[in-house]
Amino acid sequence: MLNNQFSKTIIFYCFNFSMGGTETLILRLMKYYGANNYRIILLTETKINESIAEDSHKVNFEHYIYKSSSKNFYSLNNEILSFQSIENPIVVSQFLPEFLKCSVLLIKSKYGVRFSHVLYIVHPNSTFYNPKVFKVFAKSMIGSMLRKGNLIFMDETCISKCVEFYKITENVSFNICRLPLFINDDKFVNKRNDIFNVLTVTRFEFPFKGYVLGLVNSFAKLHKKYPNTSLTIIGNGKGKMELQELILKLPESTSNNILTIDEVPYHKINDFISKSDVYVGMGTTVLDAANKNKIVVTAVAYQKENFSVGFFHDNYSTIGEVLQKKISYLNFEDLLETVITVNDSEYEIMSLKSKEMLTIHYDIKVVAEKILIGSNKFFSNFEIILINILYFTHKVSVKILQKIKN
C-alpha cells in the first residue's frame, strides 16, 4: 500500500525476471526511482530467478506474482496487489506482448485507479507482433503510442527494426532514451596486465549473441601473434556446448589461455571488468565496462563472425546493432590489435573517452526522468478495445503454436 512518504507509484512488468540486460536495467531504474520517493512494484509471472536474486535483494521494492487461476497478483506473503485511490500508477514494460497483457490485467474497474503506460523498447525485435495477419492493427496501436509519446526506444537500431517491420512511412517522432546507468566518478585507468586480458560477458543465445564464437576465432588468430594474451568468457545458455566444442578444436597453447566461467551475479561482473584490459560485448555490459573506464569493442548481434561497429567511444549510440549484410563492418582482430599495440598514453586517452561518452549520453539522472515524459497520456476507449483484440489474438496464436509443436 502507498505510504505518505511516497510521491508517485511506478510498476515494472516483466514475465520472467532472470539474469539479463532487461532485468538489470529494471533494477537500476527501481533503485533510482526508489531513491526519489516512488513506490516501486515489480510484477512477474514467476519467482525471481536465482541468477539475479542476490542483486534483487539489494533494491527495495514490492514483488507480486500473477496467478492465472485467481487472475490476481500476490506477494510472497500472499497479499493481493492493491492501491489507494490517490495513486496514479505508471506501468513500464519492455516488449509488446508484455505491454498488451499488463494493459489488459491492470484496469481501473479492478483496482480503482487509473494506469498510464510506457513501453520502453530495449531489444530490436520487441515491437514485433504475431500473428502477422493482424499486423495492421498492431501498426495502428504503435502509431498511436508514437504520437502520444509513451513508446520509447533505447537506440536507433530498435527504431529502424520497428519502422521496417511495420513499414512506417508517415512522419512521426521517435523518442530515444538510451540505457540509463549510475555513473561513477572514478577516472582512474589501470595499467595493462602483463598478460593482456580480453573479457566478454554474455548469454550463450545463438545466433542473437553468437559474436562470442567469432571472438574465440579472432582471439585464436591474435594469440599466435601476441602470445601474452588471454580471453575470459563469462556466461551460460543453450549454446554452451557449441562454444566449448569450438574452444576444444583450437591448439592447446591457445585454448589454455581461454577461461570460461559460468554465470555470476550482476554486481560481481564489475570485479572481472576491473581486472580486464579491453571489453568486447553488446547491450548493457558495454555501458558497465565504459563505467569502469575500459576501452570497449561493441559487437554486432545475430552473427557468429567477428563483426563490430567499432569502439564505444567512437560510436556511443550503437550498442545493439543487428547484422545487416549490406554493411561493411569493422572486425574484432583489428580493433583488439589496436588496443594491444597503442602506447600507454593513448591507451589511457581511449579509456577515458569511454567514460566521457557514457556520462554525456547515458546518465540515469537524465534518462530516467525522460522515460516518464509520456507517462501522463491515457488510452482512449477505441485504443483500449484495440489493445484487448491484439492481446487475445496473440494469446490464442501462442497456444495454437504450442499445440502444433507438441
Image (cartoon, rainbow, N blue to C red):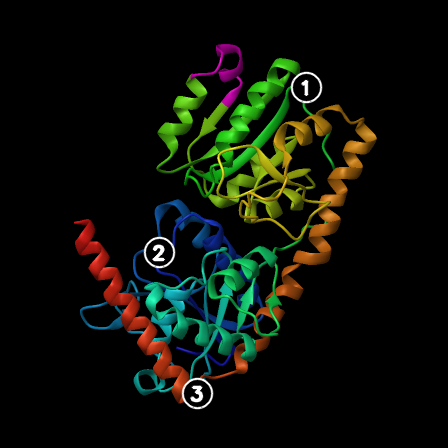
Q: Horizontal and vertical percent for residue 163?
A: 53, 64
Q: Which residue is disc 3 drawn over?
A: 380
**Dot 3: few (<14), some (14–19), or many (≥20) neighbours within 10 Å?**
few
- Confirm whether residue 6 shows in the render: no
Of the two numbered discs 3 and 1 in the rendering, the one whose residue sits closer to the viewer: 3
Task: Please state which amino acid type lies under the numbered disc 2.
Answer: Asn
* Disc 2/disc 3 C-alpha distance (Å): 29 Å
* Disc 3/disc 1 C-alpha distance (Å): 63 Å
Q: Horizontal and vertical percent for residue 330?
A: 65, 36
- Taking the spot 52% from the left edge, 26% from the top edge, the residue there is 216
Residue at disc 2, secondary structure: loop
Of the two numbered discs 2 and 1 in the rendering, the one whose residue sits closer to the viewer: 2
Of the two numbered discs 2 and 3 in the rendering, the one whose residue sits closer to the viewer: 3
**The N terminus, quarter of image:** bottom left
- Confirm whether residue 93 shows in the render: yes
Q: Give me the disc on residue 16.
A: 2
Q: Which residue is disc 1 drawn over?
A: 194
- Image-based side of 337 in relation to 249, left or right: right
Q: Which residues are magenta?
A: 249-258
- Taking the spot 47% from the left edge, 55% from the top edge, the residue there is 22
- Taking the spot 66% from the left edge, 46% from the top edge, the residue there is 291
Quadrant position of residue 264: top left
Q: Earlier in the sequence, mark 3 or mark 1?
A: 1
Q: Horizontal and vertical percent for residue 389?
A: 31, 77
Task: Please state which amino acid type lies under the numbered disc 3.
Answer: Ser
